[in-house]
Image (tube, rainbow, N blue to C red):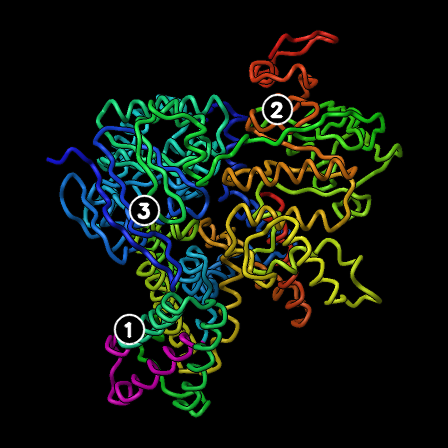
């Protein structure tokens, strides 16, 4: 197995499941650079990364949930609730002249996100119902509650710290949102690949009965995966509010599907057990670059939707064939 | 300390009024290999699930090395040194050997896994069990053979100081060579003082590996004995509660000249140049080691897989079958090896399963005639002695033998002329096996031609008119009835080519 010859190395790279999505990404970058002179500029690249970071954070939790063989369709509602509560709670603070980080609303929405996820997980695991329909339902409930809370209108504001977080860059180079995404990626990659928790997540997704018989706490880990997914969705909600500087109950539309698409394009199996965050990153970047290049080329926005759908379709079909 | 490593006394377990275990006793001495046998549904698996903490008994005592224990979860049993090697392997396909071995017992500091120490620890136990037969401990176990995965499972059990290891049908999907390796491992465990409880349907192998034996029937204890003091007939009579004259029905073997199926130089991904003829009313056996390509050839003939080259003739006409639908239309039927995955609609009832391939006989203008469907199902239930309350019983709740009978009913109802049976009696108890053999005999008498794939040599020699043996994708020889012997089959199965016209002396 440990060939060191040139052809062996190429073979190993091609056989590695990480390679597929990254080869696609590289090809996409090359094509984009050729057809649009604006694409490879520094400003445009940071712009892509900034846009990618929010979907990216959602996709971290989504990867966890897909790895255990589940799915979470309630993330957009969680994001919206997090954004609205944060912006509304921050309004009096900003009105009183506050400009700092004002951490309490952030902690609160993170706890809310975690709690929503844990509730999702608990219902799915303890009642043995399909994750798809449960999260669809809880997502609806929360969406409605959020409309009642906000009256369906954007409201609240964010402090100067958070608006800077949404628009400025570290050393003027890397957007803060991207920094946060990178930090979360590192944390969750360590969690998945270096800890007992992570190994048990893979084990459960691959064969949950076998994992149970080996003494793995299957229910606990499944519920925790949903909990963490809820929490990353709440973090994404905070990032969204920081970016648009207001709590917008409809602002998170589409993030659930984008995140699921990114995870699947990255090669994580919907059935669980196979995939990784590093692959999901490639999926996130592919989606973001596609969006960007279509905009740069001025493609009809309706046509863009068609093209994006087709890309997901092709990506999944290619993966299926490779198996 | 007690003489017994394990005592299960007066254990009773019921599932909603059904008594699965009725005051069962099991006593196993320390360091012995103890066989636990009984027909399907006799309660072996339930008893072992009670022992391994999966089920909790309603009443009764379990003692491990003289100490009374009560298990509430699999982990409790593991902690007391009881490990179970399940029939369907309990490894995680996407994790590698080391990760699987450590699962549930990871070496970690504050939840962070110490990979190097895990590698060293796992290697010690994997080497102990596999003795170097597993090439790579870091490839996902899905890439390994069943035998290799089983070794990892055993290594896992030994690694956490299991003192009692339960093996549930461990040889079911192993080749003879792999079985020999497994037995060597079992003997090594016994030498090291580990107690093994061994469950198997293959009675022959019990005499090779076991010290003592306990028989269960209908959820009750029948008898325990030293294996040296009993024989196979005794085992069978205790298992089924009556004397069975012979394990196999006697058959008249008359070979018709009419060829119904002919394969000509068929080549596929995992087999080459396969040519053979199937005669009308014949049972043609396909023998060989697991993985020799027998199933693949049949799948290609049936149109389930693509053949690269070669020809198939049905009833004297050259046909090109590219989809199972066409095969069924031509009068072929294929009862697959893995009936749960490929042969049955587990969550549907007997009636629907029986009728699924013969809807064209019982429908008019696209509407299924329910009355005829019910008649059909009732008829086969009676003919094949399917044990179930009625035809509306959902198939997943039937025993293995009855499920297999439903699969056969389905193909019989389709009025097939050529029936391919892939390991038709795998995981089925002695009584049901006998009925399936009888059924095959009735079918050929009615003019149906049967191809049977089986890894059990006594079975294939008893039921076949001719036997073709395959090795690594090629047919290595053909044995006529007079040439049947385990020795001849093994020679061909291990790749020794039969010279043209050579008569291998056997019998």
Between marks 3 and 2, how big is the CA–CA gap?
Answer: 41 Å
| Chain of the residue displaying label 3 | A
Q: Nearer the viewer, mark 3 or mark 1?
A: 3
Q: Is residue B202 visible?
A: yes
Residue A5 against residue A15 in the figure, above or below: above
Q: Is residue A272 left or right of residue B116?
A: right
SS of the residue at dot 3?
loop
Between marks 3 and 1, how big is the CA–CA gap?
Answer: 32 Å
Asked if the stretch drawn in magenta spans residue A87, the answer is yes
- The answer to which of A18 and B453 lies nearer the viewer is B453
Q: Residues within 10 Å of mark 1 (few under 14, many from 20)?
A: some
Query: Where are the magenta residues, as a range?
Result: A77-105
Residue picked out by circle 1: A111
Residue picked out by circle 2: B461
Residue B155, horizontal then vertical, whole percent:
31, 32
Q: Is residue A103 left or right of residue A175?
A: left
- The answer to which of B351 and A294 lies nearer the viewer is B351
Residue located at (71% from left, 58% from top): B376
Same chain, marks 3 and 2? no
Q: What secondary structure prevails in the magenta region?
A: helix
Quadrant where the image shows the C terminus of chain B? top right
- The answer to which of B48 and B14 lies nearer the viewer is B14
Between marks 1 and 2, how big is the CA–CA gap?
Answer: 69 Å
Are the residues at dot 1 and dot 2 in contact (C-beta closer than 8 Å)?
Answer: no
Residue B263, horizontal then vertical, whole percent:
78, 28
- Label whose residue precedes the other's in the sequence (3 or 1): 1
Asked if the stretch drawn in magenta spans residue B134, the answer is no
Residue picked out by circle 3: A214
| Chain of the residue displaying label 1 | A
Q: Nearer the viewer, mark 1 or mark 2?
A: 2
């Amino acid at each position: 197995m440990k060939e060191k010859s040139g052809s062996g190395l190429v073979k190993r790279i091609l056989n590695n499941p990480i390679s597929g999505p990254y080869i696609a990404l590289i090809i996409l970058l090359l094509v984009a650079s050729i057809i649009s002179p604006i694409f490879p500029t520094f400003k445009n690249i940071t712009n892509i990364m900034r846009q990618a970071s929010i979907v990216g954070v959602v996709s971290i939790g989504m990867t966890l949930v897909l790895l255990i063989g589940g799915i979470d369709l309630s993330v957009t509602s969680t994001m919206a609730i997090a954004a609205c509560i944060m912006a509304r709670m921050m309004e009096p603070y900003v009105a009183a002249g506050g400009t700092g980080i004002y951490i309490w609303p952030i902690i609160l929405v993170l706890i809310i996100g975690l709690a929503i996820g844990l509730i999702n997980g608990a219902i799915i695991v303890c009642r043995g119902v399909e994750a798809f329909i449960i999260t669809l339902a809880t997502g609806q409930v929360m969406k409605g509650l959020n409309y009642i809370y906000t009256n369906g209108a954007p409201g609240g504001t964010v402090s100067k710290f958070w608006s800077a977080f949404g628009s400025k860059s570290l050393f003027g180079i890397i957007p803060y949102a991207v920094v946060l995404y990178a930090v979360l990626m590192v944390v969750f990659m360590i969690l998945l690949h270096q800890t007992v928790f992570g190994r048990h997540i893979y084990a459960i997704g691959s064969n949950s009965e076998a994992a149970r018989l080996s003494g793995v706490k299957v229910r606990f880990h499944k519920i925790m995966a949903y909990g963490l997914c809820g929490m990353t969705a709440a973090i994404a909600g905070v990032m969204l509010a920081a970016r648009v500087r207001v709590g917008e109950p409809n602002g998170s539309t589409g993030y659930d599907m984008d995140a699921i698409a990114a995870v699947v394009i990255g090669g994580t199996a919907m059935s669980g057990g196979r995939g990784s965050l590093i692959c999901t990153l490639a999926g996130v970047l592919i989606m973001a670059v596609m969006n960007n290049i279509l905009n740069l080329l001025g493609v009809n926005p309706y046509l863009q939707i068609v093209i994006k759908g087709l890309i997901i379709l092709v990506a999944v079909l290619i993966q299926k064939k490779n198996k | 300390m007690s003489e017994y490593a394990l005592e299960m006394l007066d254990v009773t377990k019921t599932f909603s009024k059904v008594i699965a275990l009725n005051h069962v006793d099991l006593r196993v001495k320390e360091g012995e290999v103890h066989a636990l046998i009984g027909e399907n549904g006799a309660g072996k698996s339930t008893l072992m699930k009670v022992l391994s903490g999966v089920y909790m008994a309603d009443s009764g005592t379990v003692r491990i090395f003289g100490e009374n224990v009560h298990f509430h979860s699999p982990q409790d049993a593991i902690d007391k040194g009881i490990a179970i090697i399940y029939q369907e392997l309990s490894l995680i396909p996407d994790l590698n050997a080391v990760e699987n071995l450590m699962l549930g017992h990871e070496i970690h500091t504050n939840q962070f896994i110490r990979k190097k120490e895990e590698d060293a620890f796992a290697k010690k136990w994997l080497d102990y069990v596999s003795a170097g037969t597993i090439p790579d401990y870091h490839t996902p176990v899905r890439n390994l053979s069943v035998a290799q995965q089983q070794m990892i499972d055993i290594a896992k059990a030994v690694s956490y100081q299991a003192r009692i290891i339960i093996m549930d049908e461990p040889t079911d999907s192993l080749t003879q060579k792999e079985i020999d390796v497994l037995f060597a491992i079992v003997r090594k465990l016994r030498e090291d003082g580990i107690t093994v409880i061994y469950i198997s349907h293959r009675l022959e192998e019990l005499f090779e590996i076991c010290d003592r034996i306990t028989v269960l029937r209908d959820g009750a204890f029948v008898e325990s004995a030293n294996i040296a003091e009993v024989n196979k007939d005794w085992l069978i009579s205790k298992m089924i509660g009556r004397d069975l004259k012979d394990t196999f029905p006697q058959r008249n073997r008359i070979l018709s000249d009419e060829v119904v199926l002919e394969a000509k130089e068929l080549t596929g991904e995992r087999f080459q140049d396969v040519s053979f003829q199937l005669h009308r009313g014949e049972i043609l056996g396909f023998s060989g080691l697991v993985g020799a390509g027998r199933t693949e050839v049949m799948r290609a003939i049936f149109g389930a897989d693509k053949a690269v080259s070669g020809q198939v003739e049905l009833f004297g006409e050259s046909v090109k079958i590219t989809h199972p639908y066409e095969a069924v239309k031509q009068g072929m039927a294929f009862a697959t090896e893995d009936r749960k995955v490929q042969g049955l609609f587990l969550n549907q009832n007997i009636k629907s399963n029986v009728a699924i391939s013969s809807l064209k006989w019982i429908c008019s203008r696209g509407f299924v005639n329910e009355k005829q469907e019910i008649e059909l199902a009732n008829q086969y239930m009676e003919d094949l002695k399917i044990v179930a309350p009625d035809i509306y019983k959902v198939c997943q709740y039937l025993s293995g033998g009855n499920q297999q009978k439903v699969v056969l009913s389905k193909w019989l109802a389709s009025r097939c002329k050529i029936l391919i049976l892939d390991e038709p009696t795998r995981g089925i108890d002695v009584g049901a096996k006998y009925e399936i053999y009888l059924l095959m005999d009735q079918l050929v008498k009615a003019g149906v031609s049967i191809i049977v794939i089986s890894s059990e040599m006594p079975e294939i020699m008893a039921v076949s008119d001719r036997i073709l043996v395959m090795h690594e994708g090629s047919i290595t020889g053909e044995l006529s009835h007079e040439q049947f012997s385990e020795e001849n089959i093994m020679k061909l199965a291990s790749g020794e080519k039969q010279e043209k016209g050579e008569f291998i002396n056997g019998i």
